[in-house]
Each structure stands twice: as C-alpha cells, then as structure tokens.
Image: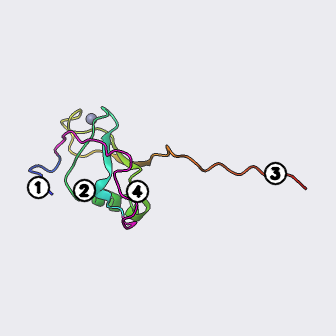
Amino acid sequence: MELEKKDYTPRPLAKPPAGAYPTTMSRKFDPELLYVECHQCGQPVLWKHGLTTKLLKLAKIDPSTLDERCVILSEGCPGCVPDETSFTTQVIRLNREKDDREPMPAAVN
Ligand SMILES: [Zn+2]
C-alpha cells in the first residue's frame, strides 16, 4: 500500500472488472475497496486510505452491510470544485443483477 502525500489526491482509478473479487474468500468486505465516483463530473475519486471507513462511521453505516456492488458518490471532487475540501457523499448499491421478482401467486386450487 503506497502512502498518499496529500489527504485528498484525485487520480485515475480503474473500475474493478466484474468478478475481480474471489467469492471463496471470507465474507468480510473491506470498505476501503469501495469505488468512489464524483457525481458532478463522473471522474473516479481516490482519497486517503481510511477515509471511507471514517465516512461510513460518521454516516452510521455498518461496513459489513456493504459489498463490492456498492459505490460512493461524491457531490464534487477537487477536480471540478478545487475550492472545496470536503464533499457530501452518499453510498449507493448497484442492482444490475436484479433478481428479486415476487413469485406470482398462482391460484391453482
Ligand atoms: Zn468532480
């Protein structure tokens, strides 16, 4: 793990390819692996290691309820709002593999 010189340094961050995380590993998900994207300009945001955990704690979000399908959206980043040093963030869950259809009640009596 390399050290960041600044607290909040934007730089390109590739989205992890699907299936990048082995499912055979333990269920514990490291919130620091969450993908962070700027909602304003759409650029990936990489911030200081540990900040995601801190944010989740502040937002009273249990990291164990998150997985690699969750992303963090930042309302602005140093790239598009250079004057700001803190940004509102929200955690969203991607539901691309939506498979929660309600079984249709079949009246077959
Ligand atoms: Zn931005």
- What residue sits right under mark 2 in the picture? 51
- In-image side of 70 versus 55 (left or right): right
Which-is-in-front pick, marks 1 and 2?
Answer: 1
- Does the magenta-highlighted stretch encompass residue 89? no
Callout 2: SS = helix
Callout 3: SS = loop
Q: Distance of mark 3 from mark 2, alpha carbons?
A: 50 Å
Instruction: Tell me residue 25's x, y (percent).
Output: 36, 65
Instruction: Tell me residue 53's x, y (percent).
Output: 29, 60
Instruction: Tell me residue 73's x, y (percent).
Output: 35, 43
Quarter residue 10 falls in? top left
User: Does the residue at mark 2 contact the one at mark 4 (Cβ under 8 Å)?
Assistant: no
User: Does the residue at mark 4 contact the one at mark 1 (Cβ under 8 Å)?
Assistant: no
Q: Earlier in the sequence, mark 3 or mark 1?
A: 1
- Does the magenta-highlighted stretch encompass residue 18? yes
Quarter residue 12 falls in? top left
- What residue sits right under mark 3 in the picture? 106
Residue at x 91%, y 56% (from the top left corner): 109
Which-is-in-front pick, marks 3 and 2?
Answer: 3
The residue range painted magenta reads: 9-28
Amino acid on which the number 4 mark rests in the picture: Asp
- What residue sits right under mark 4 in the picture? 67
Residue at x 11%, y 49% (from the top left corner): 6
Q: Distance of mark 1 from mark 2, alpha carbons?
A: 13 Å
Q: Earlier in the sequence, mark 2 or mark 4?
A: 2
Instruction: Tell me residue 8's x, y (percent).
Output: 17, 47
Amino acid on which the number 2 mark rests in the picture: Leu
- What residue sits right under mark 1 in the picture? 3
Within the displayed image, which quadrant is ligand 1 positioned in?
top left
